[in-house]
Image (tube, rainbow, N blue to C red):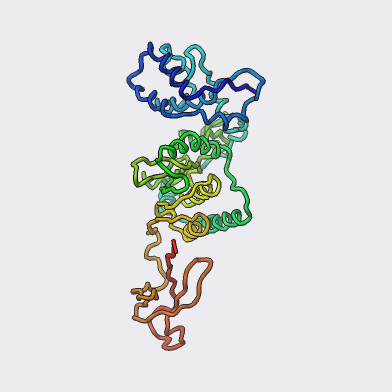
Amino acid sequence: MQMLPVLRSHKEYIRFVDTKIKKVQIPKAHHDVLPKLKLLDLTPLRLLFMPLYSPGFGRPSFAPEDMMRTFIAMVLCGVTSPTDWVNDYLKDKSGFYAIISGFLPDRVPSVGCLYDFISRILKLPKFCKDKYIRPKRKKLTRTQKKRLKEDKHKVTKRHVKIVAKLADRFQRIAQNSQEVYIPHAEKIVNDILELCCLNESQSRKLLDKQHLNISADGSKLKAHANPYGKKICECDSSCECPRFHNSPDASWGYDSYRNCFIFGYNLYQVNSWSRDHKAELPVYLMMATGSRHDSVPGMFAMNRTIQSMGYHVDNGCFDAAHDATDFYRLSRDLWNMRPFIPLNTTNQGNIKNLPVSSINEDGIPICQAGHQMYYSGYCKDRDRIKWRCPIKAAKKNRTSSVTSLMYVLLLTMGE
């Protein structure tokens, strides 16, 4: 293992940059990168990364704060490849990109060092080519693609009542005082977000982690890998041999914003907003496969945000994809959150019974024939109150056109 160098404070980093940058010409395209890096204090990462390094033995490594800073500078400069970043930017003769990262121009990390840092903090397993070899995916015809687009909202048997199953699981975990499981990569990313961004934002009164107002939604991220894989055999192009898939966890999913199917991932993001500030800051980040409906990662993200990270959400805004009875139930019973969700119009008009005409002052629905309906119990599994036709309940006038059974959803959130 490598040994950690002496910790350098953020003020010392700013002093180092101001001293070294005097004789360096700043590129016009990236003149705004350095002021942003000066605002971000990465010294709290030392306590988080300390168990990953040797306490007093081994070759001295690059400071993890500088390694993380160079990745942030890479993203701010619009570079996506660590190889290109090292060869074309960090090793640039001017030394600008090395200095803003916290390195000396003549001592910068190599490409392998950057990839090793990623594997170290995310605890990625060693590369095994066999895990990336999958059976060849069959290409869909135009008719199959059209049918798939028409059935994009169709629920398979595997996913029937999946939100209800997750709600029961989360409540059972909370009742047994069990720890909420979070994958290590997701956990470390959100810990970095909290230590370096949220704590500083709270000290500047941009948010309050115990009284959050959040808005959450998922976004489709397209993978640049070939969804059908890469050939590794020497057969003809029409062979059915297994292929190498560079993104084995990616899947096809429907992007409602672009109105098309994409091959990639679903980034679910929980953002904090304030009535006093215009800033909208990320609170929790989660990555899922592209085929996941927003209601599923929404359940996981909210449960991990509140139960594991220890944040408290007062109000939550979600889109119609989260309009599920069990999502409301968890918001009331487990998360103590007031949800604001528009009604999902996908199944609008698909009713078995006639709707109520009105509701009287006592909250009792009035049927189409003008009769006050009869209370007939409570459905625990659907969280609804059951109402019956008074004529049917009294076993009179069975030829009445009034509906015999009706369910009315009572939104009692916050009561």
Rendered view: 240 above or below 150: above
Say which quadrant the N terminus sits in: top right
Between 193 and 144, the one nearer to me in the picture: 193
- The residue at the point 57 percent across, 58 percent down is 168
Rendered view: 206 above or below 2: below
Rendered view: 346 above or below 127: below
Q: Quadrant of residue 260?
A: top left
Is 15 left or right of 58, judged from the image as shown?
left
- The residue at the point 46 percent across, 87 percent down is 395
Say which quadrant the C terminus sits in: bottom left
- The percent coordinates of residue 50 (x first, y second) are 60, 29
Asked whether the viewer can see residue 350, the reply is: yes
- The percent coordinates of residue 384 (x first, y second) are 47, 68
Between 169 and 80, the one nearer to me in the picture: 169
Q: Quadrant of residue 39?
A: top left
Is 54 left or right of 95, judged from the image as shown?
right
- The percent coordinates of residue 295 (x first, y second) are 47, 52
Q: Residue furthest right?
A: 57
- The percent coordinates of residue 375 (x first, y second) are 46, 78
Q: Quadrant of residue 121?
A: top right
- The residue at the point 53 percent across, 18 percent down is 110
Asked whether the viewer can see residue 160, the reply is: no
Between 318 and 62, the one nearer to me in the picture: 62
